[in-house]
């Protein structure tokens, strides 16, 4: 499975393949922040948004994550997950 990056997310958004996005807290023990879990139709891509080189894209603030969604043209539903799954 290929990692979902910003460019792929923008394409999925433009083609209407994104159903919703979950804004999920990243564990504080690993540096904290937020990551995006994207519910989409492409089964060849991961659900989590990744950087091009280093793995999972972790945003320092929820505002930064939402700003990234807007920059990709996403205007759909965002669900905020208050606690990460254990």
Image: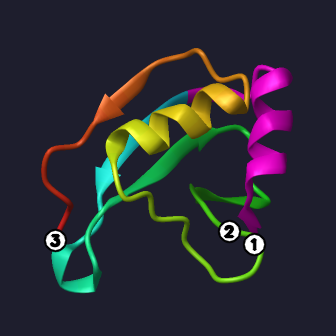
Can you say whether 77 is above or below 71 in the image?
A: above
> Which sits earlier in the primary sequence, circle 2 or circle 3?
2
Task: Characterize the local packing of mark 3: few (<14), some (14-19) or many (20 or more) Cα atoms within 10 angstroms.
Answer: few
Magenta region includes residue 18: yes
Which residue position is annotated with label 2? 51
Can you say whether 50 is above or below 6 in the image?
A: below
Q: Mark 1 to mark 3: distance in Å?
A: 23 Å
Identify the disc placed on residue 39.
none
Q: Mark 1 to mark 2: distance in Å?
A: 15 Å
- Of 73 and 81, which appears nearest the observer? 73
**Place of residue 1 in the rendered image (x, y in percent of width and height, measured from the top left):** 75, 72
Question: Which residue occupies 75% across, 81% down?
Answer: 53
* Mark 1 or 2: the one toward you: 2
Q: Is residue 38 visible?
A: yes
Can you say whether 58 is above or below 73 in the image?
A: below
For the residues bearing labels 2 and 3, Cβ distance under 8 angstroms: no
Which residue position is annotated with label 3? 86
Q: Name which quarter of the figure residue 85 lies in.
A: bottom left
- Of 22 and 63, which appears nearest the observer? 63
Helix, strand or loop at disc 1?
loop
Which region shows up in magenta? 1-19
Indicate left or right for 83 with 40 as reference: left
Q: Name which quarter of the figure residue 33 lies in.
A: bottom left
For the residues bearing labels 1 and 2, Cβ distance under 8 angstroms: no
Which residue position is annotated with label 1? 1
Magenta region includes residue 16: yes
Q: Mark 2 to mark 3: distance in Å?
A: 24 Å
């Amino acid at each position: 499975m290929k990692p979902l990056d910003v460019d792929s997310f923008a394409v999925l958004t433009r083609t209407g393949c994104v159903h919703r996005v979950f804004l999920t807290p990243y564990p504080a023990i690993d540096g904290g922040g937020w990551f995006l879990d994207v519910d989409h139709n492409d089964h060849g891509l991961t659900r989590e948004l990744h950087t091009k080189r280093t793995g999972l894209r972790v945003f320092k603030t929820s505002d930064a994550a939402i700003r990234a969604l807007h920059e990709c043209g996403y205007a759909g539903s965002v669900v905020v997950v208050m606690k990460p799954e254990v």
